[in-house]
Every structure is written in C-alpha cells, then in structure tokens.
Amino acid sequence: MGELPEDAIEAAVRALTSCAWTADITQLRRILAETALAAALPFLERATRDKIAAEIEIEGAKFFVEARRDGYRSAARVARGGEATE
C-alpha cells in the first residue's frame, strides 16, 4: 500500500466521504470500491505513466548511438501520454 501516490489516496477519501450511506452492506461495499477507484484512477494512471517513462529514459541512456537514445526519449514521451515527436 505504501506505493500509492498521496494525491490518489486523498481523492479516494474525498470521494468516499461524499457517497451515499443508505445502502445495505453489500451495496455499500460496492459503492465504496467503485467510488474509491474512480477517484484514484487518474492519479494512479499518471504515477504509472511517470514510472514507466523514467524506466524507459534510464534504459535509453545506456546507448551511445544518438538515434537510439532519441527513440527511447520518444517512447518516454508517449508513456507520459504525449506524442512521439515534440
């Protein structure tokens, strides 16, 4: 659990405090799970993209051929949600 970004946790807490508390326990568990995941997903996606991009950049830095490094830089930009070209 320690790998969850703090902003994802905070978004889930905010979403959970605003959900309906009138359902039975089975419905409530589902509502809580869906609400928490929906709130946290954008933050988790960004954190995952950043982590993948960083790993790609580290791997690309191992190459001495500039064209290969450029390819890794492009892959890192795509991993962050951008375009392959600047």
Image (tube, rainbow, N blue to C red):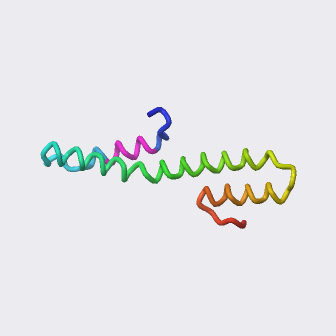
Which portion, as a residue range, is magenta?
Answer: 8-15
Nearer to me, 44 or 14: 44
Q: Nearer the viewer, residue 43 or 74?
A: 74
Q: What residue do we see at 34% from left, 45% from top?
A: 14
Please tell me how many numbered marks the rendered image carries: 0
Determine whether 71 is above or below 8 in the image: below
Looking at the rendered image, the quarter that the N terminus falls into is top left
- Residue at 47% from the left image edge and 39% from the top image edge: 4
Quadrant placement of the C terminus: bottom right
Q: Position of residue 15 (x, y in %)?
A: 32, 48
Q: Chief secondary structure of the magenta span? A: helix
- The foreground one among 71 and 40 is 71
Q: At 23% across and 44% down in the image, what residue appears? A: 29
- Choose top left, top right, bottom left or bottom right for residue 78: bottom right
Q: Per the image, is 49 magenta?
A: no
Residue 38, image x and y in percent?
36, 53
Is residue 10 inside the magenta stretch? Answer: yes
Q: Farthest residue in the top direction?
A: 2
Residue 76 horizontal side relative to residue 7, left or right: right
- Position of 72 with respect to 49 (left or right) is right
Horizontal side of 25 relative to 16 (left or right) equals left
Where is residue 24 shown, x and y percent of the image?
12, 45
* Residue at image location 41% in from the left, 48% down from the top: 40
